[in-house]
Amino acid sequence: MYSKLGYSRGVIANLSDAPNLPNPQTGETVFCTENYRVLTYDGALWMCDDFVRLINESGSTRNAGDLVIYDTTTYGRVVLTTTSDIERVAGPVVYTASNGAAVAVAIKGRYKCKVDSSAPGITTIGGKAYTYSAGNSGAAIDAITTPVVSGFYGWILERLDISRTGIKNMLIRGKVEMF
């Protein structure tokens, strides 16, 4: 078990608990048992080395798990996908963020991601995740043997046989893999 004494804010069970910690100060730390990472408050967000801090320019509030891509017109901003199989995947949003606000995006590790579509017959873990369609905030999941047009960014870590859509655990790859 982790010692609560080693972190200025102790230990939290879920990433969703971090934004609710009252009056955080820059540099404070908390250990999260959901992702087994030390989170440090950077003055705006609770961050770890699995996240990048960007600006949400999607036009609306992004919820935890929503998939975003890098904006091609303005550095440091993320938007919704403009097409399927896109190679500019940033990753899923970690904490809910309004339009124009700072947003933490998971670029590697095991994190929750919104799944909007999956191929029929996927009943085990291991399907590959890629951007779904224009304007969409979720991923599509395909079986490992089914090639996608361009690249995929992660692997599904939960069974999809009961509900093939919703928030699912993913292994985010840290880079888009090409087929």
Image (cartoon, grey):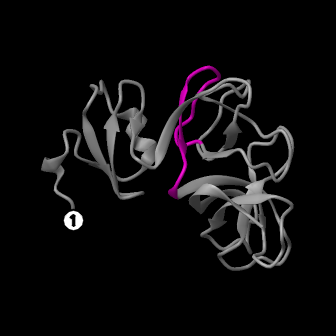
Q: Is residue 29 left or right of residue 156?
A: left
Q: x%, y% of residue 88?
A: 71, 44
Residue 19, horizontal then vertical, whole percent: 42, 34
Q: Which of 56 and 75 is in front in this view?
A: 75
Q: Name the residue under label 1.
A: 1
Residue at left offset 72%, top offset 28%: 58
The structure residue drawn at horizontal position 62% and vertical position 70%, both measured from the top left corner, is 158
Relative height, residue 67 to residue 19 (above, below): below
Residue at the image point whose x is 40% and y is 39% from the top: 47
Residue 2 among magenta residues: no
Label 1 neighbour load within 10 Å: few <14, some 14-19, many 20+: few
Q: In the visual, does 109 lie left or right of 150? A: left
Q: Quadrant of the N terminus?
A: bottom left
The quadrant the C terminus occupies is bottom right
Q: Quadrant of residue 35?
A: bottom left
Camera-side residue of 104 and 152: 152
Please give the name of the residue rendered at 80% of the width and 42% of the height, measured from the top-left corner. 136
Q: Give the residue type at disc 1.
A: Met
Which residues make up the magenta segment?
Answer: 93-109
